[in-house]
Image (cartoon, rainbow, N blue to C red):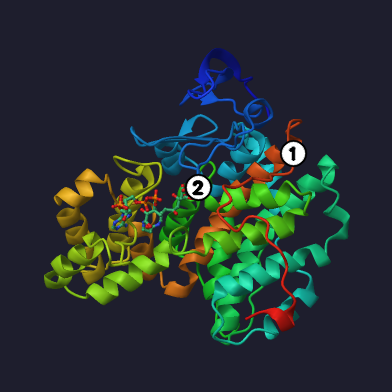
Amino acid sequence: MSKSSTKKSKSFTLTENSTGNSFELPVLEGSVGPRVIDVRNLYAETGCFTYDPGYTSTGSCESTITYIDGEDGVLLYRGYPIQDLAGKCDYPEICYLLLYGELPTELQKSKFEDNITHHTMLHEQISTFYRGFRRDSHPMAIMCGVVGALSAFYHDSLDIADPSHRMIASYRMIAKIPTIAAQAYKYSIGQPFIAPRNDLSYSENFLHMMFATPAESYEVSQTLAKAMDRILILHADHEQNASTSTVRLAGSSGANPFACIAAGIASLWGPAHGGANEAVLNMLEEIGHIDNIPKFIKKAKHKEDPFRLMGFGHRVYKNFDPRAKIMQQTCHEVLEELGIKDEPLLDLAMELERIALEDDYFIEKKLYPNVDFYSGIIFKAMGIPVSMFTVLFAVARNVGWIAQWNEMVEDPSQRIGRPRQLYLGETERTFVELKKRK
Ligand code: SDX
């Protein structure tokens, strides 16, 4: 993966007012986007840490994979706008692009797909893992468990210093995560697992494993396969979001890729992150009717009320999430192609969006629909249960996590991630024996 070198441009001078001491801090410039102040030597030179809980102003790494511009609603995968990719590529093409940095030729694409296709099966003993879960387990709990357990089966791809091990582990993760996800769903409804088929595309295969049964033949709808492919593309990568940063931090200790991806799945599960798509559907069903929208908007604005409008807001996007716009358009297309004339949840979502975007609170705080706002309505129309929504996000984001993990391992400046803190606890004090404590 070619990496454009960071250019050193001017510097910042940091002056400590009390002593008048000044420190030069180099400024680094990327190919596009905000410059960064290089504080790697700050502690050594000043004895101070930086302080940025939530990392609102902190760059954690150099990367060439995904670029986001929050003001202009730009999302590029390896320099290509998401709008072009979502409309003209399929998901395996995006996997190749994110992994290798270039769109594949026809020959490269067919070889890549063939390789992925022939790794979709799971070791037969893995299927016994599911039996240890209650049938009503949340599928994300099963995903965390089964993906983490993969490292117990693939000893031939755990040496992360070996590029061939990293690549086979990457291919295995991309190939097997739809199989694992579909099996988590089948287990939850008490149906037998459906084996992957080598004659189907990535998205067709996933839908087939989700919805086919041994009792009758199952024809995958091309409409749904196309919609699934586009949704997987839209969710594939997103710079240094919480779950990707989790994967990088886990990987920085040298943990194996399967364990790192399991950590990413755990982080994505949170309702503030990938769990939001499930939370949006639950919220829309709780709102129930357009007449109830003002009450929920009021709750969302109330400082003391923990309720937030799920599917709204984003740490980076402050005008619009380009994925949300494509998702809304896909929503209309899928409902129309499925002949779903009036989906009350869609009407409710669109009215909620309209009211919120006219409300001063949302305008002032720059809160707009994000990628999760419409995805749940499409998933519901596709027959996917709410509990599987975040699992689908994990299936899609898996390739982004893998690409970012590879980039981190290959980065010569990579070190174990070890943040510091602002300590506010007790300073040293004398120990008191148990008998003498009052
Ligand atoms: C994803 O990082 C990524 O790229 C993530 C993601 C990806 O592809 O990986 O894009 C996927 O996670 C999308 C986000 C999905 N989450 C939700 O839809 C949950 C609802 N949204 C919020 O929880 C929130 O907007 C976040 C978590 C998305 C962003 O949180 P931030 O950047 O920390 O913003 P904040 O919580 O500091 O909010 C700023 C202000 C606050 O008010 P004040 O304290 O300034 O008075 O805006 C308010 C918040 O209370 N606010 C909301 C709100 N989101 C923020 N108020 C009501 N409803 C909301 N949804």
Q: Which residue is mark 1?
A: 415
Residue furthest left as drawn: 291
Residue 357 in view of the camera = no
The quadrant of the rendering that contains the C terminus is bottom right
Q: Residue at x 52, y 64 (%)?
A: 269
Q: Which residue is mark 2?
A: 53
Q: Nearer the viewer, residue 43 or 124?
A: 43
Task: Name the spot of residue 114 as percent of width and height, x first.
Answer: 70, 50
Local SS, label 1: loop
Q: Nearer the viewer, residue 95 or 429?
A: 429
Q: Residue at x 55, y 35 (%)?
A: 59
Local SS, label 2: loop
The quadrant of the rendering that contains the N terminus is top right
Q: Nearer the viewer, residue 421 or 16?
A: 16
Determine which of the numbered discs, if any, sits on residue 75 in the image. Answer: none
Is residue 297 rendered to the left or right of residue 33?
left
Badge 2 crowding class, 10 Å Cα cut-off, few under 14, some 14 to 19, many 20 or more, is few
**Is 106 located above or below residue 276 in the figure?**
above
Task: Name the spot of residue 258 as percent of width and height, x first.
Answer: 73, 58
Is residue 157 rendered to the left or right of residue 207?
right
Residue type at numbered disc 2: Pro
Q: Quadrant of residue 405?
A: top right
Is residue 100 rendered to the left or right of residue 354?
right
Task: Name the spot of residue 396 as percent of width and height, x first.
Answer: 54, 55
Task: Name the spot of residue 371 as percent of width and height, x first.
Answer: 38, 52
Residue type at numbered disc 1: Arg
